[in-house]
Image: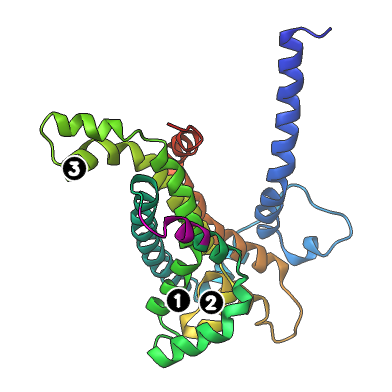
Amino acid sequence: MLGFKAKRAIFSMIAILVAAIWAFPVYWMINSSLLPNVKLESRIPTFWPDGGNLNNYQNVLQKGDFFQALGISAAVTLLAVAGCLIIAFMAALAISRFRFKGRTSFVLTVLIVQMLPAEGMFIAQSQMMSNLGLKNNILGLSLLYMAAVVPFTVWMLRGFVAGVPIELEEAAMVDGLSRAQAFFRITFPLLAPGLVASGVFAFLQCWNEFTVGLVMMTDNANHTLPLWLRAFVQSSATRAIDWGQVMAASTLVAIPVVIFFIIVQGRMTSGLVSGAVKG
């Protein structure tokens, strides 16, 4: 039989292989963004950007309105994530800490809403936002994104809240703290990793969302980054796709997400682990 070190080496090699397969599309995107179209259209693939340059990035930034779309995406995402976390956190507290009439029905309703396909509500959402004067509006799109991610975020945060024993708050109240003080001083710091992990999920859903934005943001000046990327692909007058610029634009869209992950990765990891433990 294989020894412990041999098994560990085999599993390590498998993990490295899986990681390489997972990372290869990202590498190919970055590699292609540095190459001219002559090499990209060649029958012989170029696996290393030998002789590459930043011309594709320069062309994209010069004619693509990237920073305008970046600002709109950032504003919509931040508003949606902030509102989602506040609402979902309060709902998760109510479900986990209190017993009230209709609690089970509320939980089931949250689950059913999560199952509804977004495409089935496009017409109603578009008409509603038009009547409210929120179509082609950052606030209107933020509200729709927030409504889309709240149900799953409630379920996610519910696990974190349930994982913190209520006895901690009761012990703090015995020591003289009010219920609100016990919650914010004792319980809330323990839930911070869960809020970060839930915020990451909401951020990714809002940042990468395409179909709702396509219906609600019909004005080119109000396009988010996914919509900007689509318009960029279709903007060629010759109808021939410049894949080098497309890959450069895709890399630019991905950079804010990478930066965000670098900032929150520590909290996110601890949050995912703590959410898997029941108190």
**3D distance between C-alphas at marks 3 and 1:** 36 Å
Identify which residue is drawn at 71% across, 72% down: 242
Indicate the secondary structure of the residue bearing disc 1: helix
Above or below, 1 against 50 in this view is above
Q: What is the three-letter code of the residue carrying label 1?
A: Leu
- Name the image quarter holding the N terminus: top right
Tell me which segment is drawn in magenta.
100-108
Q: Residues within 10 Å of mark 2 (few under 14, many from 20)?
A: many
User: Furthest-right residue in view?
Assistant: 43
Q: Residues within 10 Å of mark 1 (few under 14, many from 20)?
A: many
Q: Which residue is mark 2?
A: 213
Residue 104 sits inside the magenta stretch = yes
Eye-nearest disc, 3 or 1: 3
Indicate the secondary structure of the residue bearing disc 2: helix
Above or below, 200 against 214 in this view is above
Q: Position of residue 87 (x, y in %)?
A: 36, 60
| Front position in the image: 278 or 78 | 278
**3D distance between C-alphas at marks 3 and 2:** 42 Å
| Labels 2 and 1: the sequence-earlier one | 1
**3D distance between C-alphas at marks 2 and 1:** 7 Å
Identify which residue is drawn at 39% across, 51% down: 95
Q: Position of residue 200 (x, y in %)?
A: 47, 51
Q: Position of residue 137 (x, y in %)?
A: 41, 82
| Labels 3 and 1: the sequence-earlier one | 1
| Labels 3 and 2: the sequence-earlier one | 3
Marks 2 and 1 close (CB-CB < 8 Å):
yes
Q: Which residue is mark 1?
A: 141
Q: Which residue is mark 3?
A: 179
Q: Position of residue 22 (x, y in %)?
A: 70, 44
Q: What is the three-letter code of the residue carrying label 3?
A: Arg
Q: Is residue 261 left or right of residue 9?
A: left
Q: What is the three-letter code of the residue carrying label 2?
A: Gly
